[in-house]
Amino acid sequence: MPKTDMELLALSLPKPDQTMPQFPPAHPFDDDKLREECGVFGVIGVTDAANFVALGLHALQHRGQEAGGIVSHHPDEGFNSVRRFGYVRDNFTKQSLMETLPGPLAIGHVRYSTAGSKGAAIRDVQPFFGEFSMGGAAIAHNGNITNADALRRELIERGSIFQSSSDSECIIHLMARSLQRNIPERMEDALRRVEGAFSIVAMTRSELIGVRDALGVRPLVMGKIGDGYVLSSETCALDIIGADFVREIEPGEMVVISDEGVESSFPFRRKSSRFCIFEHVYFSRPDSIIGGRSVYETRRQIGVELAREAPVDADLVCPVPDSGTPAAIGFAHESGIPFGMGIIRNQYMGRTFIEPTEQIRNMGVRLKLNVNRALIRGKRVILVDDSVVRGTTSRKIKEMILDAGAAEVHFRIASPPTAWPCFYGVDTPQREKLLAATMSEDEMREHLNVDSLKFISLDGLYRAVGEAEGRSNSCPQYCDACFSGEYPVEPSDMIKKGFELKAAE
Ligand code: SF4
């Protein structure tokens, strides 16, 4: 009997490998956030480019902590690659290892898995490498290919042998089948078949390549260091290596950087930009610049808008650290209510507790956050957080604040209710597990058992990111699907189904 699409897809995916490490989240008790999946970085035209890439990936570690990889090229020694599980600082700091990645050209990738198996195998770690008749190429992908299931099935039927479960590997196989004469053109060919979100950094023996999908959902910027060039997910990673910001790669643009300079083209049909608005709210580092705006300043402005939309009488504005801090500063400034660090974050809660015991797990959020009792006692407290996903952490924080003697607890959230999953490179729980998917704002307030709960409106968020008219009166320049349910690229039923299976694991 012919197999169904889902059966074919299931057959093509590697089975869970008993030996593969099953990593907990970077912060084992920080699973109540949407999670950005990848960061990409590449450098050309500097001595020992891989050292710069390691530093860049370290600055992008917030975009993925599960694994990282670097590929370099040296004119005499060819391509070299190292891919490892764990933090960049634990893997790419040893001189003996970095010496195995020589050359003036290198790219790298940090990841948390989105497409591909959870608790991934090393074969899912990027960059991916392919050897073509005109030479090798490596690619690092941030985003999610929404037609990956159909592409994978077609490629397997035509003889491709996949090495990983990652949707990004489709790009390498599509390039292998292209009849174009050089690698950038083959990449163009391949990406014309791909739907969804992608910001890609790739390399050949002599070129560094950057590409963004036509909607520009995920970020990608270009910098300059000496005579060399840099491509990075965020500007904060340019700063760490002393590179100057040049410009953002535009939606639908491909840049090919070589000894000859930068060649730009727009190989895909141009559409209006739909950049991920959640990059402003949470994913990007506050010291990055997006669209000419400081992420920190945008988050502070979200707090200002929130204070205007949802004022409340209180004694103290307190951020849920660290991501709620800029919005809390904005809220306090606009409302005139004093700002205070009523919750202190333990900065050293990384993978210290790789396998926490049940007893330690029960301590939950207290391991990561502690209440500043002397500040909180007797006060009416406004807690400002960036988002509410499942609501589990919010409940625990409220209990800690009340235990510390707060008179009232009011939640103010710096994003609209997160009610829809993301299919563009962000790890999201199943829709039923999103608190806002099943409850009204009032029901959420009751569920969290707080004195008041308010989210910023979509219009308010758009004003904070610089759209003076808000969202309603302007053509949306952003993807806001996790708040609105309006997807700029409709995912296929199989992707939705695959998402449900993965999220249910
Ligand atoms: S759905 Fe859109 S706005 Fe939400 S996280 Fe995904 S890309 Fe960003």
Image: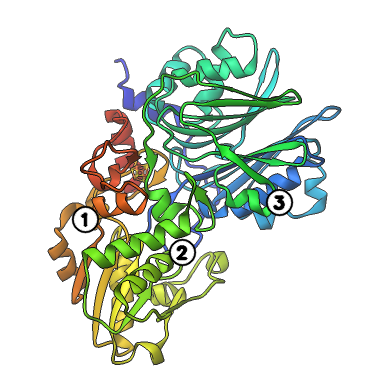
* Depth check, front residue: 476 or 113: 476
When the figure is inspected, residue 36 is found, relative to residue 3, above or below; the finding is below
- The quadrant of the image that shows the N terminus is top left
Q: Amino acid at mark 2?
A: Pro
- Specify whether residue 246 is in view: yes
The furthest residue to the front: 468
Residue 233: quadrant of the picture: top right
Residue ID for mark 3: 242
Provide residue 425's location: percent of width, then percent of height: 42, 41
* Depth check, front residue: 48 or 170: 48
Q: Does the residue at mark 1 contact the one at mark 3 (Cβ under 8 Å)?
A: no
Q: How far apart are the alpha carbons under marks 2 and 3? A: 33 Å
Asked whether mark 2 and ligand 1 are closer than 8 Å, the reply comes as no
Discs 1/2, front: 1
Residue ID for mark 2: 28
Residue in view at x 65 percent, y 52 percent = 239
Asked whether mark 1 and ligand 1 are closer than 8 Å, the reply comes as no
Mark 3 surroundings: few (<14), some (14-19) or many (≥20) residues within 10 A? few
Mark 1 surroundings: few (<14), some (14-19) or many (≥20) residues within 10 A? many
Q: How far apart are the alpha carbons under marks 1 and 2? A: 23 Å
When the figure is inspected, residue 109 is found, relative to residue 158, above or below; the finding is below
Q: Circle 2 — which element?
A: loop
- The reply, left or right, for residue 60 in relation to residue 445 is right
Mark 2 surroundings: few (<14), some (14-19) or many (≥20) residues within 10 A? many
Provide residue 499's location: percent of width, then percent of height: 33, 39
Going from the N terminus, do you reach mark 2 or mark 3 first?
Answer: 2
Residue in view at x 39 percent, y 43 percent = 276
Residue in view at x 79 percent, y 39 percent = 46
Q: Quadrant of ligand 1?
A: top left
